[in-house]
């Protein structure tokens, strides 16, 4: 059976409101008990391990931990536990491993190692019978259903919502509707995709909670449209890479919250002075997102959606099939 | 006074053996007492804050902490402390702030905040009378002398060596000679720079201790040659970005230690299958480094040197002046 190019990715993107609603509907059974058990251990430090798209969910989780839990957090380099055989003292550590497939060898090994070193280990995965799930003390399924497209979309937003529910225990009931409205209002995507037809590079930029979206948007553009996409926090872009920007360098700025917009304003000024072609993903200009009623911490679940659509459309415009990125398989195993 | 293009950067690069030797000569006064005082506090977690080039020194420090100190570590997002006003519990935390200039507002503010929250704070800086130095409890000067080039080179390797001495307390006496020998043996750089004259993108890849070098090499290429340079850990490159690689995509692989070479071998195989033009920075092929007698943890101080030279030469070949990158000032202030 062959599908039209991008049919699988389009279906995954469109299903996100339904997937997110089902996560909310099941959260009292699938998230709340593990939240209670893990936090009974009173963690002092949170470590998060992931690869690829899930690494951007890990970055989101890091912001949640630092801001909402007021705990120090770090993104783990799995290699330090696997390649270099470190055996750190992880008592008081909450160790989150995030993976759609739960199959990545280095994640499984680092989770085993973290558990041996005394951490409370939690697997956040779409595959609750995976090796990663077997390795962790607590397993939280993201209930996203099978993801048929190689490029992760619905499993990413499902990871974010699950992490939010697990880490904060707060309400997120208006998120599915905001994603639905953002999908409905996405007609400008086609126009912007046209503009990037012959681009040979692109920069994405965010700050704070909009930085994980900048990173994930860049990855989607790389894996579906083969466009070298460089993601920066606004602050880091000013340290060096700004020199690279000229009128041939399109920039996508994630300005979806008032805080991100304010923090990025000086960066956008510098980019415009350098002649860059800037597109905003935000509530007002450019690719619009329906985030008027959404807490800042939940906006990353919504503002990635226009970027997913843009990557999908651009891939097709450039003659590629986003469902069949060259050289990639759905499950990547590294150690 | 005008200099020949790149004269300042060339002088900074060439001075590195001398700078590194002077750090070793002064370390009993400038590093050891602060090491003793900071570790008397028995930190359980280490947080590291930095921007730009210093962020790659921070990544190096993270590996040192995880592997040599066997403590959990995290790279801080300064914005969570400054933009979102988090007040986390930082008792038991060792907080390292790394900055050449010590002037970046967000670093200064996050160091103040970390100190208020109970962390032992250490500034690692080339400017010991800077606002950052004033904010931190302990101040360690990197003694690199004034850096006149905008692109940081000698302050980067000076940061790495200072971090190594501070975090491990171990010997590093053979590093200046290894950097000297690497500079002496760098004649192949001109040839490789020619090859990238018309490249419109480049990928750098490392793993473990060679990953900070991959990141810093990419930044040097961006800020001096305006080449979009994407740095990946070998594992992350396999998750998505591999799709972007083709015969028009040069790749620089940092294979300077046996461990890095072994870990990157499967990645190099995939890259070659995709038609990529791969250049190794390592002891044998490509751009060679004199690391035969150097501990794995110290190799990042040596293997960045050929990349600095390559960025310098390529910038000049492309008609630019690496001493005057467009749009950049030596001190970047962000908040």
Image: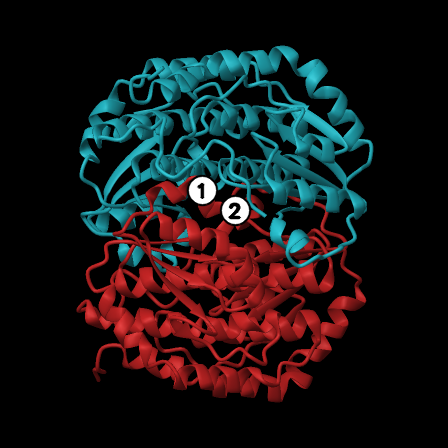
Chain colours: A red, B cyan
- Image coords of residue A36 (percent x, y): 76, 74
Q: Is residue B275 above or below residue A170?
A: above
Q: Is residue A29 above or below residue A297?
A: below
Q: Classify residue B314 as left or right of residue B179.
A: left
> Circle 2 sits in a helix, a strand or a loop, which is it?
helix
- Image coords of residue B259 (percent x, y): 45, 36
> Circle 1 sits in a helix, a strand or a loop, which is it?
loop
Packing grade of label 2 (10 A; few <14, some 14-19, many >=20) is: many
Camera-side residue: A132 or A302? A302
The residue labelled by disc 1 is B207
- Image coords of residue A81 (percent x, y): 58, 47
Packing grade of label 1 (10 A; few <14, some 14-19, many >=20) is: many
The residue labelled by disc 2 is A79
Give me the residue at 73% from left, 59% from top.
A70
Q: Is residue B150 above or below residue A15?
A: above
Residue at mark 2 shares a chain with residue at mark 1:
no
């Amino acid at each position: 059976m062959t599908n039209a190019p991008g049919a699988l990715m389009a279906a995954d993107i469109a299903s996100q409101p339904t997937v997110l609603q089902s996560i909310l509907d099941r959260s009292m059974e699938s998230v709340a008990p593990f939240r209670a058990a893990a936090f009974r251990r009173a963690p002092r430090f949170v470590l998060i391990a992931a690869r690829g798209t899930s690494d951007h969910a890990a970055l989101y989780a890091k912001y949640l931990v630092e801001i909402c839990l007021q705990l120090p957090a770090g993104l783990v380099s799995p290699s330090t536990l696997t390649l270099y055989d470190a055996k750190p003292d992880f008592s008081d550590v909450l160790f989150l491993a995030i993976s759609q497939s739960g199959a990545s060898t280095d994640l499984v090994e680092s989770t085993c190692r973290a558990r041996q070193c005394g951490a409370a280990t939690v697997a956040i995965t779409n595959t609750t019978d995976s090796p990663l799930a077997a390795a962790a003390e607590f397993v939280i399924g993201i209930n996203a259903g099978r993801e048929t497209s190689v490029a992760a979309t619905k499993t990413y937003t499902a990871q974010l919502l699950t992490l939010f529910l697990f880490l904060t225990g707060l309400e997120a009931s208006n998120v599915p509707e905001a994603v639905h409205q953002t999908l409905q209002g996405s007609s400008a995507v086609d126009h912007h995709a046209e503009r990037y037809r012959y681009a040979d590079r692109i920069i994405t930029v965010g700050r704070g909670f909009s930085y994980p979206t900048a990173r994930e948007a860049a990855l989607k553009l790389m894996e579906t449209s083969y466009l070298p996409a460089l993601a920066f926090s606004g602050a880091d872009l000013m340290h060096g890479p700004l020199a690279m920007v000229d009128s041939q360098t399109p920039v996508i700025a994630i300005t979806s919250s008032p805080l991100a917009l304010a923090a990025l304003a000086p960066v956008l000024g510098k980019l415009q002075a350098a002649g860059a072609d800037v597109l905003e993903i935000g509530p007002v200009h450019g690719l619009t997102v329906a985030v008027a009623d959404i807490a800042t911490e939940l906006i990353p679940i919504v503002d990635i959606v226009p970027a997913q659509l843009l990557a999908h459309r651009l891939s097709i415009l450039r003659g590629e099939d986003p469902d069949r990125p060259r050289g990639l398989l759905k499950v990547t195993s590294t150690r």
